[in-house]
Image (cartoon, helix red, strand yellow):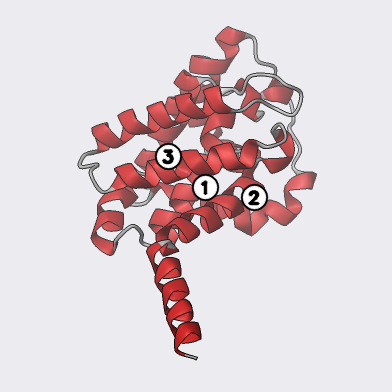
Amino acid sequence: MVKAANSTADWLRGLAAKEELSIVRGLGSLAFVRSQARTLEERSQEKVLDLLWKIRGLLESTNSREQFDHQHHLWVEEALGLVKTNRQLPLSYGQGQKTINVFLKFYVDWASRPAADVAARLRPWLHCPLDKVVMEALRSHDTDTWRLRIWDAHYRERGVSHTQRSSMSTVDERAYRAWQSWIRELSPKKPVLIDATWSLIRPMASSITLPVQ
């Protein structure tokens, strides 16, 4: 019985020591499946989870928005080098940001990790996850601003068609930064608030139409 008790105690200590890793992997897996599991090549999940664990390790030492944005760019660039689409094509910048941003929303904003004070510091700097639903909601909310800051400035010159205006494959780094700048102006204290639109209208997302403007 003593041996069994010691073994159980060791097991529990081992679990406690790896609890943070378990949380990151759990929320990271949820973010991955929610975001893009079906669109990426097989065996992508473990690579992405390793990247998310690395990201977690850098959050506490991030002390400014500029530093966060710089680190975020490096994370997306690393994601672009790690995985491909399920058609074996390179990811766009927009595709590379998705799981990272959803994970940070879950982990930092919702769960207030890795610590409450760190989460409070990071929350205004987080990037809103971009996808079709969010981008179309923003366009519908203010079409004039969308046309000036997004369409005319970043899409028209590249020959992006209106039917592809909300495709993540068309979001390059410049367009991504323009979207995030607009979102931060709309919700400076909590940019990921804009992503609430995803959960609120996602069941109707299949009915969203993209009329030519």
Q: Secondary structure at mark 1?
A: helix
Q: Position of residue 91 (x, y in %)?
A: 61, 23
Q: Position of residue 42 (x, y in %)?
A: 72, 35
Q: Secondary structure at mark 3?
A: helix
> Which of the two discs, 1 and 3, sits closer to the camera?
1
Q: Position of residue 102 (x, y in %)?
A: 52, 47
The residue tagged 2 is 34
Query: What is the residue that sits farthest to the right in this orientation?
Result: 207
Query: What is the residue that sits farthest to the left in this orientation?
Result: 63
The residue tagged 1 is 102
16 left or right of 85? left
42 left or right of 122? right
Label for residue 183? 3
Q: Position of residue 66 (x, y in %)?
A: 25, 32
Crowding at dot 2, Cα within 10 Å, few <14 / some 14-19 / many 20+, comes out as: some
Q: Quadrant of residue 61?
A: top left
Badge 2 vs badge 1, beta-carbon distance below 8 Å: yes
Q: Amino acid at mark 2?
A: Arg
Q: Amino acid at mark 3?
A: Ile
Marks 1 and 3, the one that precedes in the sequence: 1
Q: Residue at x 53, y 22 (%)?
A: 81
Crowding at dot 3, Cα within 10 Å, few <14 / some 14-19 / many 20+, comes out as: many
